[in-house]
Image (cartoon, grey):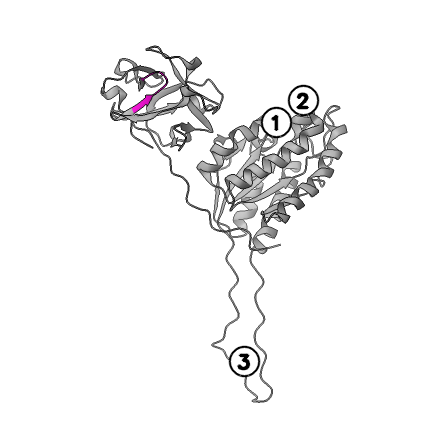
Amino acid sequence: MTAALSIGAALPATAATNQAPATARQAPAAAAPASLRVMPLGDSITWGIGSSTGNSYRSDLWNELSSEGHALDFVGTQRNGTMSDPDNEGHSGWRIDQIAGIADSVLAHYRPNVITLEIGTNDLNQNYQVSTATDRLHALIDQVTADAPDATVLVGTLIVSTNPTEEPNRPAFNQAIPAIVQAEQAAGKHVRLVDMSALTTADLSDQLHPNDGGYQKMADAFNTGIQEADDAGWIKAPVATSGGGAVHSGISGKCLDVNGGNTASGTAAQIWSCNNTSAQTWTASSDGTLRALGKCLDVTGAGTANGSKVEIWDCNGGGNQQWQPYNGGFRNPASGRCLDDPASSTTDGTQLVIWDCNGGANQQWSTP
């Protein structure tokens, strides 16, 4: 299937007047393939465990979409694999509820117009509240469509496995997905089912993850879903994002940075030479938080003393995650202290702290 709409037939000659078709009246031009801002969303299968290149299904999907004429941008806080655009939102070991915990932030930041969702394997593999797993999936899809109402969401069924904990529960999980998708469509949402049953146990690299051949089959399935959605007119141009960018320090050439681009809660917030990476892309949210990589800037342990360290953490609404513009920088109202580069350090990797607000260059921070 191609992404273009079918071309209308030429007008026939008019018998009564013996006129040939008017050459000036051309058949409608085929619609151009939609521009795509794709967020691959899910667990380690999205990340690429079992893939020889770390590219998961993403590289094969990219190549197929590119050959079909789509302008492409893959987005997400994660980067894995050898492909030229390795951005994704795949988190190894994560369950549905954990993806739900970051969905609001990452979707608001990136605003994809296509989301490829493959999630639920770890709920079953970890035997985590299996009886309500599909309820959580439905709630996640509701959340995703509320966060990105103009996006098309492609919901993949869980791939076959040989895992003795996951596999017995997989058929029932998959059997519930079509009704979830139908309910979303009945509510006017652009949600499509993507059937992954083409994969067999011969397509696995281990008990749970595809090998390269399996990832190719996943790419084919997601590509078919995208083309069908495009043919149906579901996919519109990506909307403008909510902004975000670097937070520059008053110390020349330095930026607010997440250590190593690591998304784990507790990762240090630090100064680093400005480099325009996702580890330095921050969003000032309307709820008073500063966000990067799907997490919030956080004072460790809700500390209020001078020198309390600053990190990233799951957004939780706590007072230690609130930041107000103040005297050219950011003040944490719970402590009354400001985001501070200790001793005006110029050393990359210096962890930031809070300190009495003093207006110094080491407490000056631009708004993203």
**Disc 2: which residue:** 126
Q: Is residue 207 visible?
A: no
Judge left or right: residue 305 versus residue 238.
left
| In the image, residue 154 above or below residue 256 | below
Disc 1 packing (10 Å; few <14; some 14–19; many ≥20): many
**Residue 95 shows which numbered tag?**
1
Q: In this view, does 69 lie above or below 195?
A: below
Which residues are drawn in magenta?
A: 330-336
How far apart in space, not on screen, are marks 3 and 1 (Cα)?
60 Å
Residue 137 appears in the figure:
yes
Q: Quadrant of the C terminus?
A: top left
Residue 157 included in the magenta stretch of the image: no
In front of the other: label 3 or label 2?
A: 2
Res. 187 mark: none
Q: First in sequence: mark 3 or mark 2?
A: 3
Q: Residue at x 47, y 29 (%)?
A: 294
- Say whether disc 3 or disc 1 marks the residue closer to the N-terminus: 3
The residue sitting at the right extreme is: 168
Q: Which amino acid does label 3 sit on?
A: Pro
Tell me the mark number nearer the camera, choosing from 3 and 1.
Answer: 1
Q: Residue 312, percent across and down?
A: 43, 21
Q: Where is residue 278 in the image (x, y as percent from the top left)?
A: 42, 31
Residue picked out by circle 3:
21
